[in-house]
Image (tube, rainbow, N blue to C red):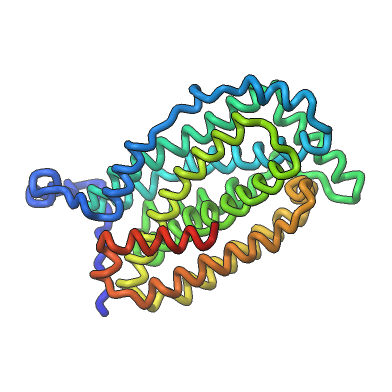
Amino acid sequence: MTAVETRVPSYESPVRKVSEWHSTNGLNMDSVPFRLYEKAKQLMWDPADIDFSRDAEDWAAMPRRYQAAFASSCRGFMIGEEGVTLDIGPLLVAMADEGRTEEVMYLTTFAFEEGKHVEFFRRWFDAVGVDAEMMHDLAVEGAQNRGFKPPDPERNRGMFESELPRIMRRAMLERSPETILDASLTYNQFIEACLAITGYKRFARMFELADALPGLQEGLRMVRADEGRHITYGTYLCRRILAANPELIDFARDRMHELYDDYITDVSADADGDAERSAGDDYDDLLRRQLDGRVRILEKAAEVALAEAETAEVHDTVTEDLAALA
């Protein structure tokens, strides 16, 4: 199978041709990206509309150990959402330079939703009167008392501090199938489909212990619905690339395990990692199972014909795969 050629961006000459405008020739409204774009419009929500008044009452009555667990998880999600908000731009530009209008249309909603997620968590902290950094400092202090090294507040190494920015900015300058695949693996497959989904499962366990904070629960349902579309797009993108370049499956498999190993090493090295485990669950095991499931999906993708990977029918399969991992 011949790999699909990827257009190299040029900053000295026009990158579009009259014949390439999709809107004049007809948008592919049956494509996976356009269908996701339609769903994003239909399921629009505003963080400012969520009522957090009950959350403030619940928070005041909540045992300290539960406060620490919820604050730590919300802070981690908020930082992650800010990171992906800042770093999604190169993927959008890469798809624009390939002339994939329907994908760019969807990615505009993707970027918008990531920004809303940052706003949601920030509004929750403000509404319940929680100083996110103070709660974090208390969690770190407790971890230090158990022998963990305190994190450097100015550190610039980590998944959101260095790895995601590095991979996404590389996609601005190098448009090989491997580079775009790496961007989607890091952003969609690992951060969203592994880290975020594992985080939602931890939230579910925490709410089983403390059925409180209805505003937080409502917002998390909205965020998770958005993330489901993001993961579906990322799976579609990986399928499309792997179907055209099946030899990249070894790279994809190895890269996912590399991301997992690096992340586990980072969070295990200091008090931040201990604070992330403050709910007392088997976080590493949850994350590992999520990783194994994503790798299986990628392995299936390398066996799919390119024409099948591009069709809308693949959307239903992706949805089923995600439901099995939920």
Q: Residue at x 54, y 30 (%)?
A: 120
Q: Residue at x 53, y 40 (%)?
A: 221
Q: Is residue 233 left or right of residue 208?
A: left
Q: Which image quadrant: the C terminus? A: bottom right
Q: Is residue 242 left or right of residue 265?
A: left
| 89 lies above or below 180 | above
Quick one: 141 or 176, which is closer to the camera? Answer: 141
Q: Position of residue 324 (x, y in %)?
A: 51, 62
Quick one: 113 or 92, which is closer to the camera? Answer: 113
Q: Is residue 286 left or right of residue 312?
A: right
Q: Which image quadrant: the N terminus? A: bottom left
Q: Position of residue 171 (x, y in %)?
A: 40, 55
| 136 lies above or below 243 | above
Q: Position of residue 306 (x, y in %)?
A: 27, 71
Q: Is residue 157 left or right of residue 48?
A: right
Q: Residue at x 51, y 48 (%)?
A: 165
